[in-house]
Image (cartoon, rainbow, N blue to C red):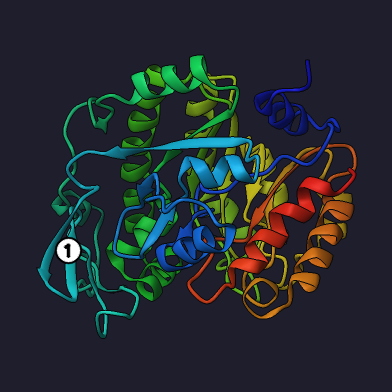
Amino acid sequence: MGITHRERVCTALSHRETDRVPLDFGGSHDTGINIHAYRALVRHLGLDEEEPAAWKSGATEVVTPGETVLRHFDIDVRGEEAHIRDVDSATMLDENTFRNGWGIISRRANATAPFMIVRGPLQHLDDPKPSDVDSLPWPEGDDVADVAGLRGRYERLRNETDYALVVKLRNIGAFNLAQRLRGFTEFLEDLIVNPAFAEALHERLTDLFCRFAAQVMGEVGDLVDGVSFADDLGIQTQPLLGPDLYRSAVEAHHARLVATIHASTDARVIMHSCGSIRALLGDLIECGVDVINPVQVNAADMDTKELKREFGKDLCFWGGIDTQKVLPYGSPADVAGEVRRRIADLAPGGGYVLTAVHNIQKEVPPENIAAMYETALAAPV
């Protein structure tokens, strides 16, 4: 009997080589696909029309592929989302505006444009104080997760399939959520000029996220192979904050969340952070992060060969196939070359799960998506 999908992923995440590189498509944070690109892919593959398995939160038109597509590409990972109740919801104010449970308002220019955050509930404050944190709509008590049916779904996947299972903890990045609540620029300024307020907000968010993570792990920690959360720390050209500021203002909160997860499960912790974050990877390893996603390969200082050489002993890589240039604008041959390059850089010795860098967008041709997975399936490790 050959290796199972679960064994393939777990072997790779244990820094050991396996028969081929494991593949993900929608099983972890931000590895899904735009609904229009998905439907084009289904037609291109000549498959029966299939609705996606799940729509992701928000109005981004990003979906998780259905089982027919996942099986066609022999995808190794399956994932389900866990949400914080009450605040992890959205109310449409008009056809182009919505407010989530935190009071963050997002708007789009028209029906085909993406939603963008335009206002946070703490953004109006000129001189924020730690006490202002109390004004937010915090869920009460320890029972903060919406876990209805979650264990049953994972038990079915565990008992009836051989896939590696990931639970996606949605919207629990303390740094990113603090920016959304306070304003992106305002919170970066607060880290310097209003540190007591910034620390109070970070601390309260981390308290909530640790309660949430502990509750979810209590439900499914014994059933999953990976636990995914997101907290973006970089932009295209550099980290959003330097290593010294990260260590003094953010690192302890990441470490506490990751420790909470590790305390209740043997699963690997997968952290999603876009952008140029090489300068922070050593700190994330110290926090206990096992896997970094999405490995934004065309951001500054994110050369995959160098990342593997510098961090590959302690860190696994999940992603790596360029979604900014190669997938949308290259040919299938270009995509195949990209896949072979990332496998050559990241797969030796294990430690690599292949998927696109972030969700596949509407303009990506179906031929290129097929070329990505078909090349990976045929490539030697």
Left-right relation of 326 to 193: right
For the question of whether residue 310 can be seen, the reply is no
Considering every residue shown, the one lying at the far bottom of the view is: 109
Q: Is residue 322 above or below residue 45?
A: below
For the question of whether residue 120 can be seen, the reply is yes
Q: Residue at x 58, y 57 (%)?
A: 45
Left-right relation of 274 to 187: right
23 vs 122, nearest the viewer: 23
Q: Residue at x 31, y 37 (%)?
A: 208
Q: Is residue 349 above or below residue 111?
A: above
Q: Amino acid at mark 1?
A: Arg
Horizontal and vertical percent for residue 294? 62, 55
Q: Residue at x 72, y 39 (%)?
A: 22
Horizontal and vertical percent for residue 129? 24, 59
Task: Count neighbours of disc 1 (C-alpha within 10 A) and say few if under 14, some if 14 to 19, many if 20 or more.
Answer: some
32 vs 213, nearest the viewer: 32
- Quadrant of the drawing holding the N terminus: top right
Q: What residue is disc 1 on?
A: 99
